Image: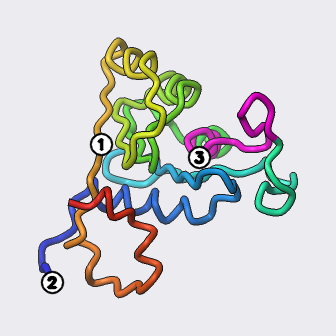
Amino acid sequence: MTTERIPWDQYFMAQAVLLSLRSTCSRLEVGATIVRDKRIIAGGYNGSVSGDVHCIDDGCYVVDNHCLRTIHAEMNALLQCAKLGIPTDQAEVYVTHFPCLHCTKALLQAGIKKIHYLKDYRNDPYAIELIDQVGASAHQVILESKYFTKLQLGEEAAAFPEDNYS
């Protein structure tokens, strides 16, 4: 067991993983945490519009291999900031999966300067190009198990994918 404090990137990514557990998407559970000045300003997970039925209840509404019912975690986090009037300029996002092209564009347009992700997921070459072009950055976080051994989660530890531990 370590007595070292959990580093910020481990802490914020763990928050994104925790948010992903609220996902109502049966195809992929994603969580996102927006951070500014080492403070969490918003969180989101992928799911339906508030008041609509959820994919886990009624199945996915898939057209052209995309679920029309689901709002992505990154968008939900950005929309929470918009709804509450919280600025996102110069903020960072921690997301469980590399953002899709649409989410990447929205994050960059909202002023997000750093995208931290846990898992590669259909990393779009144009999204990567845009991140570089606007002077933002993307970086993969590897969760280090030594920071989570205190948790004694039992089977719930599966929420932290072993292939993303160092």
Task: Measuring from the top left, give residue 34's x and y in whole percent.
Answer: 46, 46
Crowding at mark 2 (Cα within 10 Å: few <14, some 14-19, many 20+): few
Based on the displayed image, in which of its 4 quarters is residue 91 positioned? top left
The answer to whether 29 appears left or right of 6 in the picture is right
Crowding at mark 1 (Cα within 10 Å: few <14, some 14-19, many 20+): some
Element marked by disc 1? strand
Give the residues in magenta: 62-80
Give the vertical position of 161 relative to 65 (above or below).
Answer: below
The residue at which mark 1 appears reads as 140
Based on the displayed image, in which of its 4 quarters is residue 82 positioned? top right
Residue farthest to the left, as pictured: 3
Say which amino acid is labelled 1.
Answer: Gln
* CA distance separating discs 1 and 3: 17 Å
**Could you tell which of marks 1 and 3 lies nearer the N-terminus?**
3
The residue at which mark 2 appears reads as 1
Quarter of the image containing the N terminus?
bottom left
The residue at which mark 3 appears reads as 73
Element marked by disc 2? loop
The answer to whether 48 appears left or right of 83 in the picture is right
